């Protein structure tokens, strides 16, 4: 058992260490905020879409998409959002409560999902990663944006819709799914190009994440305010996904394992950006992002160990 734990730590900790390198470089001033943003933009607009497009196109849609998984994962995601927001409403207005709810439901599945999940599950993990991104970005980000915006109406929903339809990650998922459904193989040079470009997604995304975390300034009073959302993100969310996918829907182990691991990802920096843009509990959400990432450094390998041994793909 000890050997298994060490094996998971050996697999996961080097990945989290890249976040630490980015944090240290930004904290010491070796790189500027503009450099961090440039690395993050490269990963988001080029490397990550290339990775997801290639992985989704490489397998039939029936193998990468499962309606039960998508609806179950999305249902658990929205349940966590609603529960945390409802718990915060007696103490805060709607917008800050929605920001904290979004922080508990939006994991860093785009940046952390590929480098953590693919080594554990192989290319079969691409479908769950794509569906979790669709759940937590396309749905939760849109819902949070509407609830946080003052006087939310058609104009706000239209703005959110335009942002989503131009999102390069969502577009790459859609394009890859279409190619997979049509069983169209990518030409060799295109496949190698996407593989080469997509290979940079993990390191650049994690480095940029560390640099972004270095900008967050947290004081001790925020620890208590963030603890509930952190617990919901790292404990309640994975447990609820396990309950819904495994015990209620009875999905195959590969889907349950991938869903729980994705739900165990720390809070995405997008949650902080969203809260900051709407001036809604930005300090509390920044604390959730930072503390959930620090705790997930060891909590995620523990979750992976609990879900072990890796299951055989049916």
Image (spheres, helix red, strand yellow):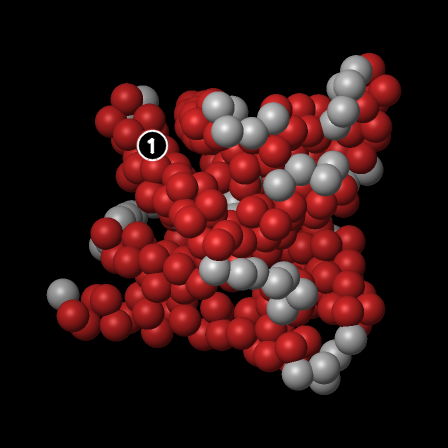
Q: Which residue is mark 1?
A: 240
Secondary-structure class at tag 1:
helix
Is 16 placed left or right of 25 in the picture?
left
Residue in the image at 74% along x and 37% along y: 278
Q: Residues within 10 Å of mark 1 (few under 14, many from 20)?
A: many
Residue 50 seen in render: no
Identify which residue, 215 or 50, lies in the foreground. Answer: 215
Residue 311 seen in render: yes
Quarter of the image with the N terminus is bottom left
Report which quarter residue 201 is drawn in.
Answer: bottom right
Task: Give the x, y percent position of residue 2.
Answer: 16, 70
Report which quarter residue 197 is drawn in.
Answer: bottom right
Direction left: furthest residue: 1
Residue in the image at 76% along x and 24% along y: 150
Residue 241 vertical placement versus 146 (above, below): below
Residue in the image at 51% along x and 25% along y: 89
Is 257 placed left or right of 209 in the picture?
left
Residue 243 vertical placement versus 176 (above, below): above
Q: How many marks?
A: 1
């Amino acid at each position: 058992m000890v050997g298994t734990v060490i094996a998971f730590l050996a697999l996961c900790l080097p990945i989290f260490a890249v976040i630490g390198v980015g944090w240290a470089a930004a904290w010491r001033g070796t790189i500027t905020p503009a450099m961090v943003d440039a690395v993050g933009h490269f990963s988001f607009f080029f490397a990550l879409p290339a990775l997801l497009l290639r992985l989704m196109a490489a397998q039939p849609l029936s193998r990468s998409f499962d309606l039960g998984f998508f609806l179950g994962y999305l249902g658990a995601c929205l349940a966590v959002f609603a529960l945390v927001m409802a718990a915060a409403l007696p103490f805060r207005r709607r917008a800050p409560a929605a920001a904290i709810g979004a922080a508990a439901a939006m994991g860093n599945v785009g940046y952390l999902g590929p480098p953590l999940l693919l080594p554990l599950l192989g290319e079969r993990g691409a479908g769950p990663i794509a569906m979790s991104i669709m759940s937590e970005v396309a749905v939760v980000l849109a819902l949070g944006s509407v609830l946080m915006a003052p006087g939310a109406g058609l104009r706000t929903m239209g703005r959110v819709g335009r942002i989503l339809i131009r999102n390069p990650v969502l577009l790459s998922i859609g394009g890859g799914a279409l190619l997979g459904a049509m069983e169209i193989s990518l030409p060799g040079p295109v496949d190698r190009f996407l593989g080469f470009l997509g290979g940079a997604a993990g390191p650049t995304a994690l480095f940029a994440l560390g640099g972004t975390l270095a900008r967050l300034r947290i004081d001790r009073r925020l620890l208590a305010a963030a603890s509930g959302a952190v617990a919901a993100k790292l404990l309640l969310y994975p447990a609820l996904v396990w309950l819904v996918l495994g015990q209620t829907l009875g999905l195959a182990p590969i889907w349950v394992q991938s869903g729980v691991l994705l739900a165990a990802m720390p809070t995405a920096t997008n949650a902080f950006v969203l809260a900051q843009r709407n001036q809604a509990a930005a300090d509390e959400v920044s604390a959730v992002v930072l503390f959930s990432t620090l705790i997930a450094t060891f909590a995620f390998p523990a979750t992976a160990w609990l879900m072990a041994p890796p299951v055989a793909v049916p």
